[in-house]
Structures are given as C-alpha cells and as structure tokens.
Image (cartoon, rainbow, N blue to C red):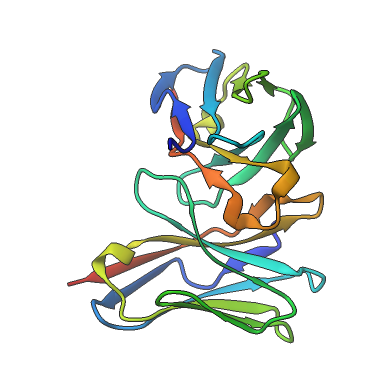
C-alpha cells in the first residue's frame, strides 16, 4: 500500500493567510520527501524537497518541515495567493529508485480573494 | 525549450478496446516514466523506460505495456480496456546519468482517458 498520506482532503483559506498542508508517512527508513503542486489541467510541478538529515527547508514563500519522530511532514505557504490554488501532493521515492515516486492522495488548497 | 509533451490530450474508448498514448520527453532527458492518476487520487507509478527497455514496473497488470524509441520518446499501450482504466495518464521524464533528486523530474500535462 501507499506509504505517504495526507490528513486533510481540502483546505480553504483567505488570500494573505498562511497555509499548512500536512502529510504522514509510514516508512521510518524514508530519507527523501518531495512536495508537488498540480494545477487543474496540468501535470505535477516540483515545489520543494527535503532530505531526512534536515528538519526544515525554506524556499520562496514555502517551507517544509520534517518531524522524523512522528513521521510527519508539512508544507507551509506564506501569504497565500489565489495562484496557489491547486492540489498539493507529498511524495517519496519508491524503494527501487529515486526517479520513481510514490504519491499521497493530495490536498486541495482553495484560496479566496 | 519544450517540456514533456503528451498526446492525445483527451480520448474516449469503450470497454475491450485498446489505446496507445504517446510521450516526448524534455530535451536532454533519456528516461521516461508513466503514471496513472485516477480522479481525486495521487499518481501511481506504472513503469519506467530507459535505453529502450522497461527498467522498473509498478503494480499494474500485463495489459499495460510500453515502448521507448531510439529518440527517447515513449508509448503506453493498454489492452482490453476496463472502466477502471479511466484516468489521467502522466508521463515524466528525467536524465538517468544526472539524477540527483526529484527536482529534475518533469511531468507532462497528461492524457485524459475515459472508458465507457
């Protein structure tokens, strides 16, 4: 079965709010995690990744936090904009190789103006 | 520079028919992976092609087959279509020799297959 999953299927926020999307994983040996954004009618787009030797990584308006103790990661989006509306997936490499991935079910983020 | 291109974008088939989907990888990429994304779900790995051979395979039946051509483009074939095969089929490309993380994976927009 899937080793990554998400807590909430839909998250609705107001423009300018900070958004937090959560993801749980089951394999304690997992050492690399990725967040993808998928807009309607498009393929998944890489947002940010994190390796297990880190507990936090920041990008432009996004931060990923990794808590290995409870096998949980989160994606934080600062000052959420309408253009951030999309489905967000966490993913991890399949055991057979880094260039193939196992995805969670996804969380839909809806940003209201 | 064109990214990953897939065709057709949409198609409708009936149960029992066969379908072929096509993918052209991003320039400079030599590895192609296919994913199936059912409505409301995350993509699921079908298989990966490198050097014209299937290198990895996910948990999909033999009705799903593929091919990679010398120019690195790829086809996904599905035989004896079932209603449950209705999904978005995504192609992702990468370069095996330089793979160092998911940030070098490029996904296409997908082919939406509806089986009636």
Rendered residue at 31%/75% (across/down): A80
Where, quadrant-wise, is the N terminus of chain A in this rendering? bottom right
Rendered residue at 80%/74% (across/down): A28
Q: How many marks?
A: 0
Rendered residue at 62%/45% (across/down): B44
Rendered residue at 30%/67% (across/down): A110
Seen from the viewer's position, the closer of residues B10 and A47 is: A47
Residue A60: tell me if it is visible: yes
Left or right: residue B85 versus residue B6 is right
Where, quadrant-wise, is the C terminus of chain A in this rendering? bottom left
Q: Vertical placement of B62 versus A91: above or below?
A: above
Task: Provide residue B94's location: percent of width, then percent of height.
Answer: 63, 42
Task: Provide residue A40's location: percent of width, then percent of height.
Answer: 34, 49
Q: Quadrant of residue B85?
A: top right
Left or right: residue A68 versus residue B115 is right
Left or right: residue A4 versus residue A13 is right
Seen from the viewer's position, the closer of residues A89 and B105 is: B105
Task: Provide residue A9's location: percent of width, then percent of height.
Answer: 45, 66
Q: Vertical placement of B81 versus A74: above or below?
A: above
Residue A1: tell me if it is visible: no
Task: Provide residue A58's location: percent of width, then percent of height.
Answer: 52, 79
Residue at the extreme left: A113
Q: Vertical placement of A103 versus A23: above or below?
A: above
Q: Vertical placement of B110 versus A10: above or below?
A: above
Left or right: residue A97 versus residue A21 is right
Seen from the viewer's position, the closer of residues A52 and A24 is: A52
């Amino acid at each position: 079965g899937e080793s990554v999953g998400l807590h909430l299927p839909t998250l609705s926020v107001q423009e300018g709010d900070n958004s937090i999307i959560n993801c749980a994983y089951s394999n304690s040996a997992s050492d690399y995690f990725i967040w993808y954004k998928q807009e309607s009618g498009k393929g998944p787009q890489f947002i940010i990744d994190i390796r297990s030797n880190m507990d936090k990584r920041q990008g432009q308006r996004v931060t990923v936090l990794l808590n290995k103790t409870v096998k949980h990661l989160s994606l934080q989006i600062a000052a959420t904009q309408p253009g951030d509306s999309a489905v967000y997936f966490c993913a991890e490499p399949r055991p057979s190789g880094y260039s193939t991935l196992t995805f969670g079910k996804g969380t839909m983020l809806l940003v209201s103006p | 520079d064109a990214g990953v291109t897939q065709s057709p974008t949409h198609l409708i088939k009936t149960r029992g028919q066969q379908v072929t989907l096509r993918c052209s990888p991003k320039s400079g990429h030599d590895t192609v992976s296919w994913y199936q994304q059912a409505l409301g779900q995350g993509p699921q790995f079908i298989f990966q092609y490198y050097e014209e051979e299937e290198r990895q395979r996910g948990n999909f039946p033999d009705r799903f087959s593929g091919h990679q051509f010398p120019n690195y483009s790829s086809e996904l074939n599905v035989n004896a279509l079932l209603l449950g095969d209705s999904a978005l089929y995504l192609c992702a490309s990468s370069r095996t020799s330089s793979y160092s993380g998911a940030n070098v994976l490029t996904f296409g927009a997908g082919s939406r297959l509806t089986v009636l």
